[in-house]
Amino acid sequence: MGEVLAAPARRILNMKEAAAYLGMSVTTFRECVAPKVQSIKLMPSRVSYDVDELNKFIDRASGRAPAPTEKQFWDQYR
């Protein structure tokens, strides 16, 4: 059976940790995910990623949540 991974104990992850959280290499994360996820600069030379943003990326990529630019049915009535 598949291994169940626990959510990280910290909310903010560095790039290496974020890549591991998504189960991919740092290179793949940098090329495919980082351009599509909001990063956080807590220090000038350090880029971090919010676990909530990574989870939203997973939801969008899997089709479970709409992309932020997609209009929803009710948006036309606003």
Image (spheres, rainbow, N blue to C red):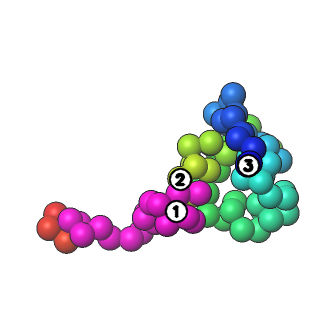
- The answer to whether residue 47 of the structure is visible from this angle is no
Check whether the beta carbons of the residues at disc 2 and disc 1 lie within 8 A of each other: yes
Marks 2 and 3, the one that precedes in the sequence: 3
61 part of magenta stretch: yes
Q: Residue furthest left?
A: 77
- Measured from the top left, where is residue 21 in percent x and y? 74, 46
> Secondary structure under badge 2?
helix
Highlighted range, magenta: 58-75
> Secondary structure under badge 1?
helix
Marks 1 and 3, the one that precedes in the sequence: 3
Judged left or right of residue 41, residue 59 is left
Check whether the beta carbons of the residues at disc 1 and disc 3 lie within 8 A of each other: no
Q: Nearer the viewer, residue 73 or 49?
A: 73
Which label is found at residue 56? 2
> Which residue is located at x 76 percent, y 68 percent?
31
> Secondary structure under badge 3?
loop
- Measured from the top left, where is residue 30 in percent x and y? 78, 62
**Residue type (three-letter) at the residue carrying disc 2:** Lys
Q: Is residue 60 above or below residue 40?
A: below
Q: Distance between the residues labelled 2 and 1?
A: 6 Å
Neighbourhood count class around disc 2 (C-alpha, 10 Å): few under 14, some 14–19, many 20 upward: some
Residue denoted by label 3? 2
Between label 2 and label 3, give the one nearer the viewer: 3
70 part of magenta stretch: yes
- Measured from the top left, where is residue 27 in percent x and y? 85, 63
Which label is found at residue 60? 1
> Which residue is located at x 67 percent, y 45 percent?
49
**Residue type (three-letter) at the residue carrying disc 3:** Gly
